[in-house]
Image: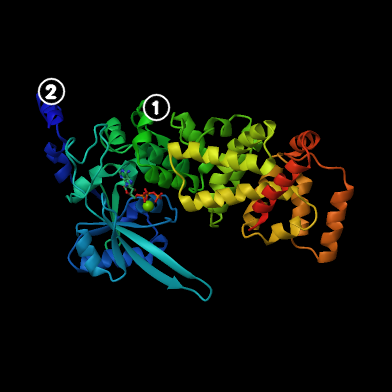
């Protein structure tokens, strides 16, 4: 209320009082000019727009899918925008559900099956949003939008979208694109331009700062100076974003197929502070062989080959250097290997939770992958046989390979395990004998072990073994 009065007194306009957005006419772009290949469009997205149009509503493919189609890229998912309300959409599709509270949308699910797999596709349908007043109970003091379920015109919906190239609407029936904010020109000029006043748009939703970085890395477009300039000074607003949303956006960025260049751009625009601890270390200039760089390169390659990604593995890789450092420090204070590792893990995860929490199920994966690491260094007795039966052995082994490539451990260790897991029982015994006869390789925990053995009596050794036993039970 007071804010509203101050605004009126100082003459700052409510955007609702700017009728231009409500009535703004789009530029229609015909097929001969946009060259969208209909083969790249999801049949299910077409079904959704057709069903809505047949029921008398407006319906378009919108957002990133149109952007990608114009760039000749197969979109990874399809969003539909309509003037039907979520309830009306839900009534038209048997397999649909309304999701979200603060920002309601409808998920329409389709299944297709081949002889071997069943695939699921979700088309996200959102109702045209109205422009919001700059103040009111749905806006936080920082300017961040808290709730957003007010329906509006298509022109308003376009003005509410983030970048000009994300604000185009494609009608599969007429094969026409409706361009509200010169998106076609920006596509041609390879420019990422925020719609409206960038500072205000970033304040409304600080996640847009992460989005611009992701799109810049994905499209290789330049960020328009006016859209770039406010980011460094508004970067701190990222911390107001609810943790779950921040996690989702970070995950999108990391599995975009351009994770490494996205993280570099995050640093270049001044957004790296505090998102992932030690991002600076990860991005150091001489980090070409760093563990995180290797992991991200591998991830980017997998995404570009259309393979699946395990977010748990990815976050385990990104936070590993930190876990590893803490682990070494704790061992130097005389803590047993496994106990030190668990304490290091707890510490790093607690620090990360303060910034943005990684979903529990991924945290569990990370924990498992990390906890397996000391067990790869125990190549005696029954231990290797138990390890290859452990449920997360494969992920733990892949992680070990990365560590070896990053020169944290000798390459022979990965090669030994590579053989041990696939070979015959006789050869396994032979491999174990080899290790027994070899002089010990310089593994991460060796220095600590010898120091402890000298210092401690049999009682302490027994308790260390107990810890390892707990560790080994799957
Ligand atoms: P991707 O290829 O990663 O899916 P996208 O642009 O489709 O990119 P989505 O998160 O799927 O991204 O969002 C779909 C569309 O919704 C966007 O293109 C944009 O028009 C709009 N949008 C999404 N998030 C925001 C936001 N935070 N602020 C404004 N508009 C947004
Ligand atoms: Mg999308």
On screen, residue 15 above or below 31: above
Label placed on residue 176: none
108 left or right of 24? Answer: right
Look at the numbered discs 2 and 1 and tell me whether their residues touch, using CB distance below 8 Å.
Answer: no
On screen, residue 106 above or below 415: below
Residue in view at x 39 percent, y 54 percent: 69
Query: How is the rendered protein coloured?
Result: rainbow
**265 and 74: which one is in front?**
265
On screen, residue 244 above or below 135: below
For disc 2, the marked residue is: 10
469 left or right of 5? Answer: right
Task: Point out the residue furthest to the right here.
Answer: 437
**8 and 456: which one is in front?**
456
Label placed on residue 232: 1
Residue in view at x 43 percent, y 71 percent: 112
Residue 269: percent from the left, percent from the top?
A: 44, 30
Residue 468: percent from the left, percent from the top?
A: 69, 49
Quadrant that contains the N terminus: top left
Residue 300: percent from the left, percent from the top?
A: 55, 48
345 left or right of 458? Answer: left
> Quadrant of residue 419 in the image?
bottom right
| Other-residue count near label 1 (Cα within 10 Å), few / some / many at <14 / 14–19 / ≥20 | some
Sequence-wise, the earlier of marks 2 and 1 is 2
Task: Point out the residue furthest to the bottom here.
Answer: 115
Q: Is residue 26 visible?
A: no
| Other-residue count near label 2 (Cα within 10 Å), few / some / many at <14 / 14–19 / ≥20 | few
Task: Point out the residue furthest to the top here.
Answer: 10
Dot 2 lies on which element? helix
Residue in view at x 76 percent, y 40 percent: 443
The answer for how far apart the CA atoms under marks 2 and 1 are is 27 Å
């Amino acid at each position: 209320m007071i804010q509203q009065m101050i605004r009126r007194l100082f003459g700052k306009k409510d955007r609702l009082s700017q009728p231009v957005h409500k009535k703004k006419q789009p530029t229609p772009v015909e097929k001969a000019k946009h060259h969208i290949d209909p083969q790249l469009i999801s049949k299910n997205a077409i079904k959704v727009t057709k069903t809505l149009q047949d029921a008398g509503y407006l319906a378009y493919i919108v957002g990133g899918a149109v952007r990608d189609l114009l760039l000749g890229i197969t979109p990874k998912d399809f969003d539909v925008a309509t003037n039907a309300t979520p309830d009306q959409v839900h009534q038209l599709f048997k397999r649909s559900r309304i999701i979200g509270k603060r920002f309601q949308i409808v998920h329409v699910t389709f299944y297709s099956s081949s002889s071997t797999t069943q695939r699921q596709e979700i088309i996200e349908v959102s109702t045209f949003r109205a422009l919001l007043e700059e103040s009111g109970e749905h806006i936080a003091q920082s300017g961040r939008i808290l709730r957003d379920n007010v329906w509006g015109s298509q022109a308003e919906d376009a003005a509410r979208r983030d970048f000009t190239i994300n604000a185009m609407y494609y009608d599969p029936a007429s094969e026409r694109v409706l361009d509200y904010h010169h998106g076609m020109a920006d596509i041609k000029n390879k420019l990422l331009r925020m719609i409206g006043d960038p500072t205000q748009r970033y304040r409304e939703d600080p996640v847009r700062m992460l989005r611009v970085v992701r799109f810049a890395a994905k499209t290789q477009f330049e960020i328009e100076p006016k859209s770039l300039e406010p980011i460094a000074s508004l970067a701190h607003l990222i911390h107001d974003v609810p943790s779950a949303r921040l996690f989702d956006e970070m995950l999108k960025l990391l599995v975009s197929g351009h994770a490494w260049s996205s993280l570099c751009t995050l640093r270049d625009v001044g957004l790296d502070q505090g998102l992932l601890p030690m991002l600076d270390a990860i991005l150091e200039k001489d980090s070409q062989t760093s563990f995180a760089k290797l992991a991200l390169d591998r991830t980017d390659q997998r995404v570009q080959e259309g393979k699946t990604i395990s977010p748990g593995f990815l976050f385990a890789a990104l936070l590993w250097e930190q876990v590893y450092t803490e682990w070494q420090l704790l061992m130097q204070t005389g803590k047993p290997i496994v106990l030190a590792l668990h304490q290091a893990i707890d510490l790093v995860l607690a620090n990360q939770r303060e910034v943005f929490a990684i979903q529990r199920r991924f945290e569990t994966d990370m924990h498992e992958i990390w906890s397996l690491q000391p067990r790869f260094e125990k190549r005696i007795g029954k231990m290797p046989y138990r390890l290859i039966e452990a449920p997360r052995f494969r992920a733990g082994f892949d992680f070990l390979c990365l560590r070896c490539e990053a020169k944290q451990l000798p390459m022979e260790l990965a090669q030994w395990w590579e053989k041990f897991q696939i070979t015959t029982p006789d050869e396994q015994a032979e491999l174990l004998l080899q290790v027994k006869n070899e002089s010990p390789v310089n593994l991460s925990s060796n220095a600590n072990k010898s120091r402890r053995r000298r210092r401690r009596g049999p009682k302490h050794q027994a308790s260390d073994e107990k810890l390892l036993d707990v560790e080994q039970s799957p």
